[in-house]
Amino acid sequence: MSNNGHHFNGASSEAPILRAQHVSKLYTDGQVSALVDVSLEIYSGEYVSIMGHSGSGKSTLLNMLGMLDRPTSGEVFLDGQPVSQVRNLDSLRAQKIGFVFQSFYLLPVLSAMENVQVPMFEGNLPMAQRPKKAVELLELVKLGHRVNHSPLQLSVGERQRVAIARALANDPLLLLADEPTGNLDSKSADTVFDLFAQLHRERGMTIVLITHSEDLGVRADRIIRMADGRLLSDTRSPGHSSRQAAADHGSESDLGPAGLGLGLVRPPRPKSILPPFAVPDHG
Ligand code: ADP
Ligand code: MG
């Protein structure tokens, strides 16, 4: 299979980036069926929101898709590979997936640009090129003027944008975000969603995000609704095809310099994306 997964489309003639096949998750400690026989496919270039009430299984599903946890039964395929067969999950995850969480997990003792470089320690980019790339990614999220600030000196919205820049550090195949605006005021939440939309539209980034916000969630091209660990509905908005969007908006990028590796060709790179020692900066 081709490793250049960044084609601007969601066409079903292509193999999906991500496929869940009859995935169930039972949390045995509470005998909770958090996911029940969920099957779905995510294609390159799609922008998908997952919505549903608290406890409906959204985070559990994202954790399965992102290989942060293993299903009780069923299989997840990433880029055609059955995840259960993968020896080094950390490495595969770090190569292919950028994560954004409700809690930003930034390190307060590091500057913004140092935070963005944390995942690069496990990537392939030579040390000498990392600061420049970190600055470029911060420019991409419109924080080029705050590269040397500590997260503590940034607003919550700015912190989440640093976290998004960090998620892009190793040029992932897709972004997974779990309630990325859950700790943000509505204006910052708006800005963060604008950023996701631009990454999708202008860079062809594949995005799957969970949100509580109906207003924000419906901005995605495809909306999956969950209840009681099952998919309730899965709808694509007409006239919102990824290819269409990429074609419509391809010429008006203001997302910074090309050659960040977010586009058509990904260099090979390994390893983990999450700073293992990071702690949430809120309760
Ligand atoms: P959502 O993200 O939609 O709020 P979750 O996926 O977090 O829902 O949770 C789905 C169900 O699984 C809930 O009933 C929740 O209480 C339960 N659950 C989640 N994580 C665990 C866990 N680690 N142990 C036991 N039950 C869990
Ligand atoms: Mg959740």
Image (cartoon, grey):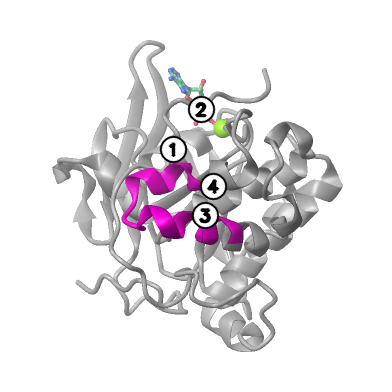
Q: Distance between the residues labelled 1 and 4?
A: 11 Å
Identified by mark 1, the residue type is Leu
* Residue that numbered label 2 is attached to: 278
Q: Which residue is drawn at 28% across and 63% down?
A: 268
Density class for disc 1 (Cα within 10 Å; few <14, some 14-19, many ≥20) is many
Identified by mark 4, the residue type is Val
Q: Look at the numbered discs 2 and 4 and tell me whether their residues touch, using CB distance below 8 Å.
A: no
In this view, the residue farthest toward the front is 128
Q: Which of marks 1 and 4 is in front?
A: 4
Q: Which residue is drawn at 56% across and 28% down?
A: 55
Give the image quarter of residue 80.
bottom left
Q: How far apart are marks 4 and 3 (CA)?
A: 9 Å
* Residue that numbered label 3 is attached to: 131
Query: Which secondary structure is most common in the magenta stretch?
Result: helix
Tell me which numbered mark, 2 or 4, is placed earlier along the sequence: 4
Identified by mark 2, the residue type is Ala
The image shows residue 241 at horizontal and vertical percentages of 56, 78
The image shows residue 105 at horizontal and vertical percentages of 57, 32
Density class for disc 4 (Cα within 10 Å; few <14, some 14-19, many ≥20) is many
Give the image quarter of residue 246.
bottom right
Disc 2, SS: loop
